[in-house]
Image (cartoon, rainbow, N blue to C red):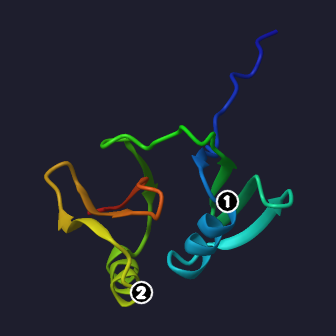
Amino acid sequence: MSEKVPELFGVGPVLPVHDVAKTVEFYCSMLGFELDFVMGTPPDHGSVTRGRVGIQFTLAPAEFVVTSFPGWIYIFVDNIDTLHSEYLERDVQITRPLESCEHGMRELEIQDLNGFRLRFGQYL
C-alpha cells in the first residue's frame, strides 16, 4: 500500500512588526487587504487577507530591525496593471517599477511601512 505524498497548497508568512495595529491598518487601507483578526490589548498579533493571500503580523522585540535587504514576499496576481494603478492612486511606495521581465513575468514591487517588500507578478 503506497501512501499519498503530501501536497503543499499554501503559505502564510508571519512578519515581525513593532506596531500590529498600524500594520494591519496600512495593509487594509493602502494595499486593499481585509482584516481577519487582531489579538491582544494592545494588539500583539494580526492577520489580513486579499484573495487567497494571507499575511500575519506578530509583535517584534524592541531591538528587531528590518535589514537593508530583508528579501520579499512574492505574490502572483492576475491583473497587475490594475493593481499598479490602484497603488499609484493610494500613493503606495513603489520600490521597483512595473515592468515585463525576461523570465516571463510582469512585476511590480512595493515597500510597506515596516520596510518589508512585496513583489507582485503576473505571467506574460
Q: Residue at x 63, y 43 (%)?
A: 60
Which quadrant would the C terminus be assigned to in this image?
A: bottom left
Amino acid type, label 1: Val
Whole-percent x and y of residue 93?
Answer: 33, 72
In the picture, residue 54 is in which quadrant?
bottom right
Q: Residue at x 56, y 73 (%)?
A: 26
Give the secondary structure at mark 1: helix
Whether residue 101 sits left or right of residue 114 in the image: it is left
**Residue at the disc numbered 2:** 90
Give the secondary structure at mark 2: loop
Q: Residue at x 70, y 26 (%)?
A: 6
In the picture, residue 40 is in which quadrant?
bottom right
In the picture, residue 117 is in which quadrant?
bottom left
Q: Residues within 10 Å of mark 1 (few under 14, many from 20)?
A: many
Image height check: is 54 above or below 73? below
**Residue at the disc numbered 1:** 20
Q: Nearer the viewer, residue 43 or 85?
A: 43
Whole-percent x and y of residue 12?
Answer: 64, 46
Mark nearest the camera among 2 and 1 is: 1
